[in-house]
Amino acid sequence: MTNTYRTQKCGEVSKTQVGQVVKLAGWVSTIRDHGGITFVDLRDQSGIVQIVVGDSQKLSGVSREAVISAKGVVRLRGEDNINPKLSTGEIEVFADDIEVLGAVYAPLPFEIEDSKNVREDVRLKYRFLDLRNPELFKNIIFRSQVIDFMRQEMKSMGFLEISTPIITASSPEGARDFIIPARQHPGKFYALPQSPQVFKQLLMVSGFDKYFQIAPCFRDEDARADRAAGEFYQLDMEMAFSTQEDWFEIGEKLYTDLFGHFSKKTMTKAPFPRIPYFESLERFGTDKPDLRNPLEIKDVSKVFENTGFNAFKNSTVKAICVPNLAGQPRSFYDNLTTFMINNQSKGLAWIKVEDGLEFNSPIAKFLTDEEKQALVKILDAHVGSSIFMLAGKKAMTTKLAGILRKELGERLNLCDPNTYAFCWITDFPLYELNDDGELDFAHNPFSQPKGGMKAFEKPVLEMQADQWDLVCNGYELASGAVRNHNCEVMEKMFEVVGYGADVVRAKFGALYDAFKYGAPPHAGMAPGIDRTLMLLLDEVSIKEVIPFPLNKSAYDPLTNAPSTVTDKQLSEAHIKVDIKED
């Protein structure tokens, strides 16, 4: 088939075609006028090729980023003009025919190759230009390649790709729903799925053995650097007659193959370390530990049970000992203290361990010899070490210690950038006390309690969910669980938090009914695609791996979404907008 605009793509022209006439089409990346002869770098998805134009009049009205078609003869470049950075760097096309296919009618809002340094609102407003930036452009192509690899990997393991509904019922999964008015059902609403959770479990009850899909998920959550506002994609998976061990094997194969294929960095070899949830909090101050960081947190509260130091009295005290910090200036400690105060800490106690294991610290005079000796022993402190301590209520102090550990790792360059450190976080609590001091589900009500009905013989806050997370370099990449598939257990789980069987039927009617008709044990996992791409591409913002993201306020400057609708649209949806002005 003959193409009107081009005989091939820009990046495909080679020196085997020298002397041949080709026709190329793409965007004008650069124009260089050398007095009587003009050089144009022509770009399309495949790459860049140099076009030589002998008559500058042929480029009249052509500017950077215009779309043109160029017809001419392929010729070799001179030895001094070869560009080894381009796949087409040995040749150029001497064009005798230029056609403008898409002119540029307005000044560019920013330089394409510098777009990553432009304000976010401008980048997103002109995202179609931002995406032309070679780095971002490659990211989106890479995204497609990774998703294709995931899809082939799942199929190779016998998983069947099945699509589930996008318009569904509201489901209590922990985040806010995006709701959709139902025109044919006045006063009722659909919801965009926070995940395909209910449907993938129903597929297992239907008799499908292994399911997966590249699933869009919608949650009305605030954005973070590693979390997109509004929507994200996950590799959603479920398997009948499976256990946690089965999923560890699947997850380790998937990520070992995936990262091994797309990255040359070293990575944790399977089996990945397994760390219970509460142990992770104690050692690292988080359930998403970066294991590249060798620092660990120690609870030294017992050292100060009878202390005279008021700041530590009747408090949980967490400590981190950093070896080989001799020579750090006082400003290092002061700046770190300011950082922690800005993160809601009341302060930061620090100690330099000097010759003779003497303490050089503003708090040294408040500590007894016994307390100093106990700290040295528990923390294995040596000359040149520095000890950092935080005190307060347990939950907050644990969180702050995790923030401190991460910050120390970054300031001291303790984390090898050429390593992927994977681990599984296991044994999550099933219940927790919410901000009002009432019992609530710690995560979601879909996970099976470890031990089934026997689990309810334990104190409620000691019950564990058959649930796990896959963590890499401080990021949660995937969550998984053995699902509850028993109606009685389901009712009992809700009874603990004060709800009867009627609530279970109301919230999970489809699952509750399905479980009455022969439900197999099943489990699943869902790796986040966007966050996985962030790690593989070494990006610090998730927006750099998403084609058209919302901004941090969940607004799209490109399409002006969300937007107002007409009174007629509201009337058809049986909605009245009542907004009170401040």
Image (cartoon, rainbow, N blue to C red):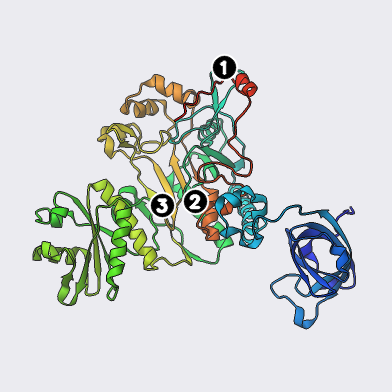
Count neighbours of disc 3 (C-alpha within 10 A) and say few if under 14, some if 14 to 19, many if 20 or more.
many
Are discs 2 and 1 less than 8 Å apart at CB? Answer: no
Residue 424 numbered mark, or none: 3
Q: Element type at marker 1?
A: loop
Q: Element type at marker 2?
A: helix
Question: Image height check: is 569 above or below 449?
Answer: above
Q: Quadrant of residue 459?
A: top left
Question: Image height check: is 25 above or below 315?
Answer: below
Question: Label 2 sits on what residue type?
Answer: Gly
Viewer-nearest of discs 2 and 1: 1
Whether residue 421 can be seen here: yes
Are discs 2 and 3 less than 8 Å apart at CB? Answer: yes
- Of the residues under marks 2 and 1, which one precedes in the sequence? 1
Question: Label 3 sits on what residue type?
Answer: Trp
Whether residue 183 can be seen here: no
- Of the residues under marks 2 and 3, which one precedes in the sequence? 2
Percent x, y of residue 182: 59, 22
Q: For the view shown, which residue lies furthest in the front direction?
A: 582
Percent x, y of residue 233: 56, 44
- Of the residues under marks 1 and 3, which one precedes in the sequence? 1
Count neighbours of disc 2 (C-alpha within 10 A) and say few if under 14, some if 14 to 19, many if 20 or more.
many
Mark 2–mark 1 Cα distance, whole angstroms, equals: 44 Å
Mark 2–mark 3 Cα distance, whole angstroms, equals: 10 Å
Q: Element type at marker 3?
A: strand
Residue 85 numbered mark, or none: none
Question: Image height check: is 164 above or below 234?
Answer: above
Percent x, y of residue 458: 26, 35
Count neighbours of disc 1 (C-alpha within 10 A) and say few if under 14, some if 14 to 19, many if 20 or more.
few
Q: Nearer the viewer, residue 133 or 248?
A: 133
Query: Circle 1 is placed at which residue position?
Result: 186
Residue 251 numbered mark, or none: 2
Viewer-nearest of discs 1 and 3: 1
